């Protein structure tokens, strides 16, 4: 199958002169349509930088990144927002919901910006809200929602416009374990049933065990890949813990 995302020799250098830091060092990999890929690595290893560069939030210093046939490193600034809106979905650790909008309005925002018809939007919101179990919360404001409910709202917003790819950066980082499990189960179900392509950055082995493949990153370089294959989620969890122990991550990275 043709790859959805192709990353060729990507570097990202921060700063100038003596203060330069190579946050990404010659990264190359591909993600196929319908994959659920995790990115793991110690704090400061370059996970968020990688996600931001792939998600067109930040530009690489060199290298090529293709999403289908678009070389995103070459899309002009004026066109990037449009490209992101029509092709990508985002879930962040701190939800990034707009406080002055209800859950429904937050979810519908990408469709409203894309100027979809109101009836289309209502139908889509009801469908996605059902998937994430937040139908009864749609008229509430973010301050009236728990962390888990806010993240399910953010996930609904990320998926409402049927993006080609969803990028999630530590989406369970601020959630209690029950809410985290709930979100992860819903994301894996979407991935299995609708072949939604997801790339999720996490330092948490439990969250990573829901993925089908894990890329490990160390000092800005890809160091290893684990594939779940026929393993159960629990077996995969153990394999991930073993790998983290081998890498020698700090205690926080194996919880
Ligand atoms: N905007 C920035 N300017 C300068 N250095 C940065 C910036 N963002 C991240 N870094 C540095 O790049 C490295 C990788 O950071 P990051 O991608 O956030 O790691 P991770 O998400 O794995 O914790 C770290 O050393 C970090 O301090
Ligand atoms: Mg990070």
Image (tube, rainbow, N blue to C red):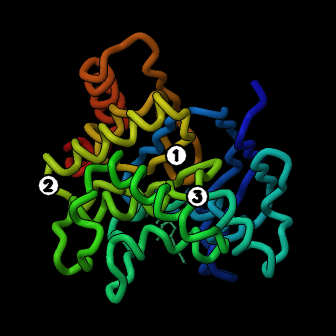
Mark 1 vs mark 3: which is more N-terminal? 3
* Mark whose residue sits in front, 2 or 3: 3
Q: Quadrant of residue 56?
A: bottom right
At label 1, counting other C-alpha atoms closer than 10 Å, the crowd grade (few under 14, some 14-19, many 20 or more) is many
Q: Residue at x 44, y 38 (%)?
A: 190
Q: Residue at x 73, y 66 (%)?
A: 83
Q: How much space separates mark 1 and mark 3, taking CA atoms?
A: 17 Å
The residue beneath circle 2 is 176
Q: Position of residue 240 (x, y in %)?
A: 33, 29
From what the image shows, is residue 121 above or below residue 196? below
* Mark 3 residue CB less than 8 A from any atom of ligand 2: no
55 or 242, nearer to the observer: 55
55 or 221, nearer to the observer: 55
Q: Secondary structure at mark 1?
A: strand
* Mark 2 residue CB less than 8 A from any atom of ligand 2: no
Left or right of residue 7, residue 142 in this image? left
Q: How many marks?
A: 3
Which label is found at residue 161? 3
The quadrant of the image that shows the N terminus is top right
Q: Residue at x 61, y 53 (%)?
A: 163
Q: How much space separates mark 1 and mark 2, taking CA atoms?
A: 21 Å
Which label is found at residue 199? 1
* Whether residue 47 can be seen here: no
Left or right of residue 83, residue 97 in this image? left
* Mark 1 residue CB less than 8 A from any atom of ligand 1: no
From what the image shows, is residue 253 above or below residue 1? below
From what the image shows, is residue 148 above or below residue 117? above
Left or right of residue 63, residue 248 in this image? left
């Amino acid at each position: 199958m043709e790859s959805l995302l192709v990353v060729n020799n990507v570097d990202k250098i921060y700063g100038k002169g003596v203060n330069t830091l190579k946050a990404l060092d010659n990264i190359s990999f591909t993600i196929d349509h319908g994959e659920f890929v995790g990115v793991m690595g110690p704090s400061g290893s370059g996970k968020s930088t990688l996600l931001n560069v792939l998600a067109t939030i930040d530009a690489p210093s060199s290298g090529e990144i293709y999403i289908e046939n678009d070389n995103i490193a070459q899309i002009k600034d004026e066109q990037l927002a449009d490209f992101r809106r029509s092709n990508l979905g985002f879930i962040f650790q701190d939800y990034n919901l707009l406080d002055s909008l209800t859950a429904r309005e937050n979810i519908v925002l990408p469709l409203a910006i894309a100027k979809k018809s109101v009836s289309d939007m209502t139908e889509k919101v009801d469908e996605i809200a059902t998937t994430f179990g937040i139908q009864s919360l749609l008229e509430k404001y973010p301050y009236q929602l728990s962390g888990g409910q806010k993240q399910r709202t953010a996930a609904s917003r990320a998926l409402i416009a049927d993006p080609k790819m969803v990028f999630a950066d530590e989406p369970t980082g601020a959630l209690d374990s029950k809410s985290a499990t709930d979100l992860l189960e819903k994301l894996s179900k979407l991935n299995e049933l609708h072949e939604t392509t997801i790339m999720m950055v996490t330092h948490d082995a439990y969250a990573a065990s829901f993925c089908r493949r894990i890329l490990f990153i160390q000092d800005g370089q890809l160091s290893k890949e684990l594939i779940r294959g026929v393993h159960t989620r629990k077996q995969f969890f153990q394999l991930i813990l073993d790998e983290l122990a081998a890498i020698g991550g700090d205690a926080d990275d194996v919880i």
